[in-house]
Each structure stands twice: as C-alpha cells, then as structure tokens.
Image: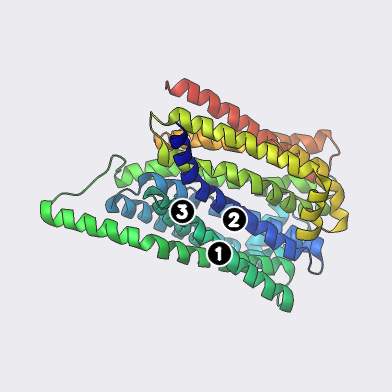
Amino acid sequence: MKSKYKHIFLAWLPLGVMYIVMAAEQPVVNGVISRLPDAVNQLASFGYAFSLALLIEGPVVQMLSAGTAVSGTYSSYKKILKVMHWLTVITLSVHLLFCIPGVFRGFALHVMNLPQPLIDQAWKCFVFMIPWTPCIGYRRLWQGVLIKHGKSILAPIVMYVRLAFAFLFLYLGYTFQPLEGASLGGAIMGMVAVVGMGMAFLLSRPIIHSLKKEYFDILKNTKTVLKDENELSYRQMVRFYFPLAITSMVSLGVRPILNFGIPRGSFPIESLAAWPIVLSYVSLYTAVSQSQQEIVIAEMSKASYKLLQRFVTVVAFAITALFLINWFVIPFRTIIFQNIFGLPQQLNKFLPIAIAILSPLGFFAAKISWYRGVFISRQQTKTITAGIIVNLCTLLLFIIVLPIVTNLAGVYIATIAYTASFISEFFFLSIQLRLSFSI
C-alpha cells in the first residue's frame, strides 16, 4: 500500500512543482510592475488586459488534460494536434479582433466598465500578448504527451526555463524601463509563452518521433493502424474536447466578469489594482490543488480509485493548513507583500479580509480537480461543463447582487463571489459523481 502511495506521490510531485512555477509567474510580474512609476494604475491595467487574454485562452487550457488522456498513439496524437490547430486559428482571430483600438475601447468602456484612465495602457498590454494563447495551447498539449508517456518529471523543466526567461526579461525591463509597467508585463508574458512552447516541443519531440516510427512500422508490416483503448475518431475527439474547451473558457471568463463587478463596488481603482495581487497569491496554493487533475487522469483505474481519492484529500487538507499558517504568521505575510510583491501602501488595508475570504479555495480546488479527473478519465466531459456553468451562475449572482445590497469594496465583492463559485461547483460535482458512478 505504501509503495502505491509513493508511486502516486512521485508521479504527481513534478506536476505540483510545474503548477507552482506557473502560478509564480504572474506574482513576479506584478511585483516588478508595483515598483515602477504609476504603480496602481499600471497594476489595474495589466490585471484587466491579462484577464481578457485569459478569457480568449480558455479553449486551449485543457490541452494538458487532453494530451494526457488521448495521446497514446501517433494517430490519436495527430487528431488532438489537428484540434489544436483549429483552436489556434479561432482564438488568434478573436485576439486580433480585440487588438483593433475601437473594438477594445468599446468593450472595455461600455461592457466591462473599465475606468477611462486605464484603457490605453490596458490596450497596449493586450497587444503585446498576441502570441499568448497559441503558445500556451501547444505547450500544454506537448506537456500532456510527456505525462501520458511516463515523462512527467520533464514537464516542470518547461516552466523552469520559462520562469528563468521571465526573470531575465523583468530584470532588463526594470533596469532600462523601455515600457510602462502594464506594457512591460504584457510583453514579457507574450515572450515567455513562446519560450515555453519551444521548450515543450523540444522535450516531447523524441516521444512523438518514436510514436510516429512505431505507427509507420506497423502500418508497413501489417497494413493496419495501432490503436489504444482511448483511440477516438476525429468526430469523437471533437466531442470529447469541446466540453473541456467550454469549461476552460467559462472558467477563465470568471476574471473579466469579476473585473466587470469590481468597479461597481467601493474603491474601484484600488480594488482593480489589489485584485490581481490577491488572486495571484492565492493561486500559488490552488495551483498545487489543480495539478492533481492530470495525475488522476493518468493513474485512474478501478484498483487505484480509492488510493487516488485519499491522496487528493490529504493534499487538499495539507494545502489549506499551509495557507492558514503562512497567512496568519504576520512577519511572513509582510515579507511576501511588502518585500516580494512590493505592494503599494494604499492597497495594504484590503489584504487581510480579502485573502481570509479566499482561504478555503485550496481545499475546494483540490476536490474539484479530483472530480474533473474522474469524469475526464471516463470521457464524461459534459458533466464538467455543467459544473462550471453552476460555478459561473453562482459568481454572476453574487457579482450582481452584492453591489446593490452592500457598500463593500470591489475587491471584497470579488473574493466573496469567487469563493462561493468554487463551493457551488464542488457540491454539484460531488452529487453528480454519486449519482453517475457506483465504485
């Protein structure tokens, strides 16, 4: 039994590290922007542009799970790669459409209620992030290939290299200051996305080459195509991935929705500046939780179900405990936000309550990752989409109602809505799993 837990832990550990490194990227960028001139406005502009880029990125995010689940043979890999090609065309077209100044300004001003002083800087940041979505999609697909073929230990290397380049670009940007804070952040996020994609391709290339050779050797000798148990037709592949794409798009659409609600509360600009920092700090913990989805997909079987379930639960409680210890030890909190994030003084007053409200997210994110992993491994992806719709409806309810019935700061409205949305999705998926499966 201990050896099985050890196997799961060692398989998951590189993924956990990878997700932490991914989550660390935005706090690092925020920390540099906060030390540049006009920090509050630049942080708010970067936060808005980044959230819009994430919304467009949504359809490709689950490529990591898809690559892990269905890239067992060369033919199945080519099918999911073709899906990624089409998603690149669609998402890049949408991003370029929003790069048109009139379109961006109209959407930001009249739909998202972004304060007028932030629009120009947010647009410049968004333009610099044009490579973001396609590079993220291909990088995650190739990392999924690594995980599928037992090379999960290589997946974090992509993120180490990406983060190293982020530090290099940030150092140069901070030293020479060729751009304003928001534009610098957008440029760096775009460049390191390209670096990550290139590194993932280099690491996965030997596996893809081996799959290709095996495919054509068998085809040449037997005139038949090798298939694994997860092999899907193109139509089935699209049906498998489409709910995942919708799930990620809706999930990442949460950030623009929150940015829509934040200015309707008190202290709108301060809240828009504080929210990305609050969220990026909490994401360091939820990233560890979310990393478990891939290991559940990779290791799922009837024999391992209970082991995986216990493992996820233990990690969920451990993350929550670590979060509470780190947050309530005031010297540690000061080091993070003053020395690392360089938080502007006027934003400090919002932190204690905002992050305390978000403290349960590590636990709920881990359990949601467990449920999603189970449903993906059984190709029941529509249930995951239903769960994120419940999440979104809860979020919208709180975002609309709270500014009407309270006078809370916008950042508090966002944290309450965000936490409530996770809790509602957790209970929905829990009920669906009990109704759908008897294990």
Q: Nearer the viewer, residue 338 or 244?
A: 338
Q: Secondary structure at mark 3?
A: helix
Which residue has dot 2 on it?
A: 21
Q: Position of residue 40 (x, y in %)?
A: 81, 60
Q: Label 2 is placed on what type of residue?
A: Val
Is residue 228 in sight in this rendering?
A: yes
Q: Residues within 10 Å of mark 2 (few under 14, many from 20)?
A: many
- Residue 291's place in the image compared with 125, above or below, is above
Which residue has dot 3 on it?
A: 153
Q: Label 1 is placed on what type of residue?
A: Arg
> As drawn, is 356 to the left or to the right of 296?
right
Among the two numbered marks 1 and 3 on one chain, the one whose residue lies closer to the N terminus: 3
Give me the residue at 27% from left, 52% from top. Answer: 75
Q: Nearer the viewer, residue 52 or 295?
A: 295
Give me the residue at 71% from left, 53% from top. Answer: 110
Q: Label 3 is placed on what type of residue?
A: Ile
CB under 8 Å between callouts 1 and 3?
Answer: no
Q: CA distance from mark 2 to mark 1?
A: 9 Å
Which residue has dot 1 on it?
A: 162
From the viewer's perspective, is the residue at label 2 or at label 3 nearer? 3
Specify the quadrant of the image occupied by residue 123: bottom right
Q: Position of residue 229 (x, y in %)?
A: 28, 39
From the viewer's perspective, is the residue at label 1 or at label 3 nearer? 3
